Amino acid sequence: RSQVRARAAGSARRTYAAGTRSAAARRGNGGHRSRFSAVRLLLVAVLLVAGVKLVQVQWFDAAALSAAAERQRAQTIDIPAQRGSIVDRNGAKLAFSVEVRTLSVNLKALHKSMDDFAAKNPGTAKTFDSETAGAAKYIAGKLPNVITEQQLLDLFHKQASFTYLVNNVEPSIAADIVKHYAWIGVEKRALREYPGGNLAANIVGAANWRSDDPDVSKHNLHGLVGLELIRDNDLAGTPGRMLVNTKNGSDNVVIPGTERDIQAAVPGSDLELTIDSDLQYEVQRQLSDYVRNSHAKGGQAVVLDAKTGEVYALANDTTFDPNDQSTWTTEDLSNPAVTTPFEPGSVNKLVTATGAIEYGVATPESTVEVPGALQVADKTVHDAWTHGTQTFTTTGIFAKSSNIGTLLLARKIGEERYANLLKLFGLGQRTGVGLPGESAGSVPARSQWSATTFGNLPIGQGLSMTILQMAGMYQAIANDGLRVEPRIVKAKVNPDGTTVPEPAPKAVQVVGPQTAKTVRDMMRAVAQNGKGLQKGTAPTAAVEGYQISGKTGTGQQVDPRTKAYSDHLYNITFAGILPADHPRFVVGIRLDAPDTTLPVGHSAAPLFHTIASYLTQRYQIPLSDGPSPEVPLIIAP
């Protein structure tokens, strides 16, 4: 019975367990179906959300996202405008621009990228030091005469977040460097080239890259001195802007074909000058040599077209090389030919000679009794040589440069008419040549003339002028009495090739043509090489085969120590017309305090001869109709 009971009990237990399993099985099958349904619903929801998002991205947000992506890989680059060239009257380039690159590095970003690389690549040999050492060696090898490896290493390790490395790198070399070291920054710049070095530098001036303006678009070549400065607006042009795509991770690598202009750059205009670069070179050279040989402090010279007033050459004895800014000095950058007036001495006697003829005070042959001294207010005037009373012809007064004879004629002209002539000749007024810093010189106002003023002005003391003003006086006489304001820029050539001539210079009729011719003929005697008293003051100015009109000058300088006129410091001047019978050129020369005890120091006439001789050859000036006639200067008793 016990076994039966046990079997029965076991049977009862098995029966319960089986039912339980059956029920569980039924419940399990239903759970699987429920989970499957839930997953399907979840997938449908995800796909629905993705679809909505896709529609939003591709339709509603497409433009915004595209713009954002474009901003991430696109850069706006300022395009510097090509600066206009400066050329001489024959088209020879005196200044032009070339495209260059400036290399730089963002040190802060480079340090971070190297640190991040090292963190991701433990034990790497690529570090900031190794990377910059390689770059320094590579760049120095590409630019052997520009920068050294050590200089670059110093720049890479300077305490700064950013530094420039090298300026004025050729574009192809810069591109090669960036190809090897993409973290090197590159800026497009321009370099001003002056192929003649210091040739006409006092006229042309200099320009360099300027990046001091907060507006990056204005970073470009800009003038510092000379025409580069005063005509900067014409030369500079208008910068543009370009949008480019760059490769991921490198702002320096532009994807080819992605460049598109937002605003095209407009090149600057060219300037065509009146100067002849070959003549300018020769005048600069001859002047510098003469200043050195005469032991002068300095000197200036100018050559004008006798008819048009155009400046063919304008030189100082010292100047600068605009290609090498490290050599510039303030003194060299100045242009004394237009900025520094001086007391001219006897070249100013031209005013009295002109007035004497124009107002009928004298004729070339009329005579004047000239004593050995003349009292003017509280001072006594003498001639440069001691003499008793002598009979001078009017021509002789100026050919011999008699102070006393000049003052006697000036008295006959009168103060009012004389003052008016000074104005007509342009003294005390800027010439308007178009160069920066031009001085007007100084002529005392008529209301301020004292008793001694009219004893100084006719002999070239008590007033001042620039070498350009001095030459302008003689240009009026060479041009039949019509003074034409000098100019140095002939025309502007626009980017489209159209030529815009400069405004016509002002012209002033100083005296009539006959007066001018008479004075011109009188002044030929200055170069007369007669015997004894019949010799002019400048026979060394003469050029064989050509008639020469001119005038020497010796103006006392004020001694800076005593503040009075010096007995050893002089302005030695000469102004001449070539040829006198058919004027083509006017030459003006000034020597600043030469050693007057030297043969080349007491007169500038030999320098005029040299310059005039070159002019006759270069421009194949026809010979004069005949030699200048010898005329009496002093009548022997």
Image (cartoon, helix red, strand yellow):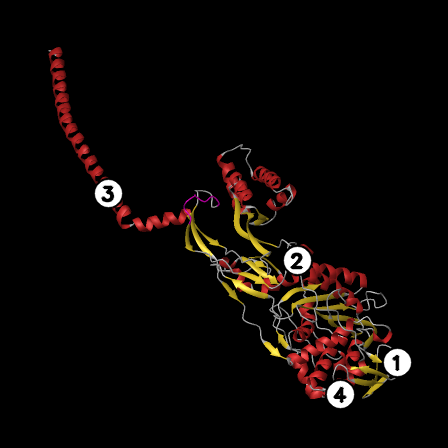
Quadrant in the picture for the N terminus? top left
Residue 474 lies, in percent from the top left, at 69, 74
Residue 224 lies, in percent from the top left, at 61, 62
Query: What residue is at 77 percent from the left and 79 percent from the top?
Result: 395
Callout 1: SS: loop
- The earlier-in-sequence mark between 2 and 3 is 3
Amino acid found under the numbered disc labelled 1: His
Residue at numbered disc 4:
411
In the rendered image, which quarter is residue 192 located in? bottom right
Residue 70 lies, in percent from the top left, at 38, 48
- The earlier-in-sequence mark between 4 and 2 is 2
Identify the main secondary structure in magenta. Answer: loop
Amino acid found under the numbered disc labelled 4: Arg
Residue at numbered disc 3:
51
Amino acid found under the numbered disc labelled 3: Gly
Residue at numbered disc 2:
278
User: Is 336 rendered above or below residue 5?
Assistant: below
How crowded pointer 4 is (Cα within 10 Å; few <14, some 14-19, many 20+) is rated as some
